[in-house]
Image (spheres, helix red, strand yellow):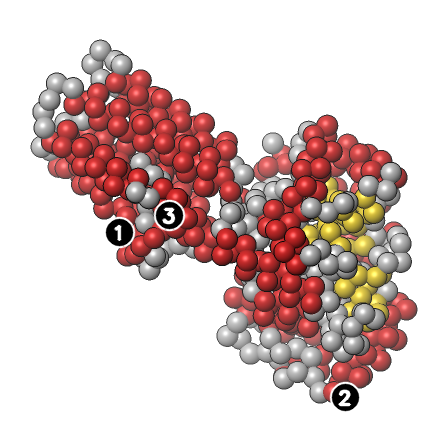
Amino acid sequence: MLSSRRNVLKAIAAATIAGGATGLSFNSSKSAIAGPLLRRIPSSGEEIPVVGLGSWITFNVGNDPVLLDECTAVIGAFFKDGGRMIDSSPMYGSSQSTIGFGLRKIGYPQQLFSAEKVWTSSPSSGPQQIEETRAKWGVERFDLMQVHNLLAWEEHLDSLRAKKAASELRYIGVTTSHGRRHETLERIMQSEDIDFVQLTYNILDREAEARLLPLARERGIAVIVNRPYRRGDLIRRFSGKPLPTWAGEIGISSWAQFLLKFIIGHPAVTCSIPATTRIDHVRENLASAADILPDRAMRKRMTSYVEQF
Amino acid sequence: MSYWSGYAISDFLLFSPRVYERLFELHNSALWPAHCVAVITGLTIIAFVIRNTAFRGRVVYALIGAAWLFVAWAFFMTSYQSINWAAEYMAPLIAVEGVLLLALTAMERPPDPMFPVAPAGMIAMLVLLFGLLGYPLVAPFFGRTWQSAEFFALTPDPTAIATLAVLALSSGTARWVGMLIPTAWCIATGLTLWTLGRPDFYIAPLAGLLCLGAAFARRG
C-alpha cells in the first residue's frame, strides 16, 4: 500500500531534516508531495531530481517510427512528472538519435539535464564524436560529459576540462558499470578534479558502498547510479516474492520502488538512471523519489530481506 | 585488449527482443516484393542441385554469392546498422563471403553441389531445403509475426544455413574456405538470440553443425 497522508507528511519532515546532511530537498517547481526529491551536485550546489532516465537498450529503436513515438511518449512523461537528467552514450546504438527525436517533438524542455559520454579509444577523435552526439540531440551544449567506461580516460579528461573551461560543458565525469575497474575509478576520484562519477550500484551489487560512495562524499563528487535493476533482472528475480509488510512505511508498493528507493536512499547517490520503454514505469520510478527514503537502518533491513531469497 | 576483456556477451546486446523482431518487419516491408525473387532464386538453386548439368556449380555459387552481397548491403548496411553500430564492421565480412563464393565460379572446376545419395548428403539436402524455403516458417512457429519472417538472400541466417548446406553437398577442398564465415555467423546469431532469450536460438548453430558433420562424413 502507498503511504498514508500522515506518512507522507512525516516523510517530508524527515527528508527536510535529513536535507542538510545529504544534500536532499524537494523539487520546488512542483508540489512537495508530487515532485521528485532533489540532490545537490557538490561541485556547484545545483539541485537535480534523484531519479533520471537511462537509455541503454530501451531507446535503441533505429528508424522504427512506432517505437520512436513510444520513446517520445516516455520522454514526455519523464519531464511532465518532474524528471531532468537523461543519460546516453555513443555505445547505445541509435539511442542518442531517439532522444534527439523525442526532444524535438516535445520542444526541448528547459529543465533538461543532458548527460552524455565520449567513447573512443582515439583521444583525438573525442571532440568530433562529442560534436556528432550534440547534433543528434540537437542541444546547444551538454550539461555533463563523461568518459565512458574509463576508455582513454586520461586524454579525454584533459580535453573535457578544456571544454568546461570554455563553457562548452557544465560538468565532467567518468563512468564504469557492472563493477568493473573500481580500483582505477577510486584512483581517479582521489586524484582528478571531476564533478561526477557513474557506477553500478543496486541492492545486490553493493561493492561501491565500501570505498567509492564514501570517497564521493569526501571528495564532493556527484554519483550517478546505473543498472539499478540490473536491466530488469532484479525485478524479474523478486517478482512473485512478497514485499515485506514494513515496505509501506516508506511508501513502497512494488519491487521496482523497493529496489530504487534502496539506491537513492544512500546519501552519496545524486541520481539513479533506470531505463524503460513504458510510461507507467517512468512514472513509478519518479514516484519512488516523491516521498520518504529509507534511512541507514531501513536500508540494512532491505538488504537482509532480499538476501533470504 | 584488457579493456574489452572486462565485457560479457550480454554487454554487446544493444537492443530488445521487440526491437529485433520489428527490425525484420521493417526490413521485409522495405524490400517487398524482393521476397518473390528470393523464393525463385531458392527454387532455382534446388533445381540445379537436383539436375546434373555441366555448369551446376557455377550457377549455384553465383546465385549464393550474389545473395551474400545483397545481404551485406540490404541487411547489414541498411537495416541492422540502425540498431547495431557493429553491423558496419560485419558487412565487409559478409561481402567477402559473397566475393569468395563468386570466385568459386571462376575456377576451372568449381565445387559441384551434387544431389546426394548417402545419408550424410541427404541431411545436408534437407538443411538446404530448410534454409532456402522453410526458414520463413520459423518466426510464426515460435510465436512471432509473419511480417518478421526471414528469407534466404534477404537476411543472414537462412542465407548462411543454405550456403553451408550447398558447400556440404559439394566436392573439392575450396568449399572448406567458403564455410568459415557462414559458420561464424551461425555461432554469432545463436549467441545473439540466446542473449535475447529467444527460444529458437539453437536453430542456426544446429543447422550449421549438421552441415559441417555432413561435409566431414562425405569427405570420407
Counting from the top left corner in percent of width and height, residue B70 is at: 36, 32
Q: Is residue B105 above or below residue A127?
A: above
Mark 1–mark 2 distance (CA, rounded to whole Å):
59 Å
- Find disc 1 in the rendering and name its residue: B137
Q: Residues within 10 Å of mark 3 (few under 14, many from 20)?
A: few
Q: What kind of residue is marked 3?
A: Ser
Looking at the image, which is closer to me, A280 or B169? A280
- Location of the C terminus of chain B by quadrant is top left
Secondary structure beneath label 2? helix
Which disc, if any, is residue A54? none
Secondary structure beneath label 3? helix
Counting from the top left corner in percent of width and height, residue A69 is at: 55, 58
- Find disc 2 in the rendering and name its residue: A6
Whether discs 3 and 2 lie on one chain: the answer is no
Residue A29 picture quarter: bottom right
* Rendered residue at 86%/75% (across/down): A16
Q: Residues within 10 Å of mark 2 (few under 14, many from 20)?
A: few
Farthest residue in the top direction?
B108
Q: What kind of residue is marked 1?
A: Leu
Tell me which label, 1 or 3, sits earlier in the chain. Answer: 3
* Chain letter for the residue marked with disc 1 in the picture: B
* Rendered residue at 69%/67% (across/down): A80
Secondary structure beneath label 1? helix
Mark 1–mark 3 distance (CA, rounded to whole Å):
17 Å
- Find disc 3 in the rendering and name its residue: B29
Tag 1 and tag 2, C-beta contact below 8 Å: no
Q: What kind of residue is marked 2?
A: Arg
Is any part of residue A85 visible from this angle?
Answer: no
Mark 3–mark 2 distance (CA, rounded to whole Å):
56 Å
Is any part of residue A286 visible from this angle?
Answer: yes
* Chain letter for the residue marked with disc 2 in the picture: A
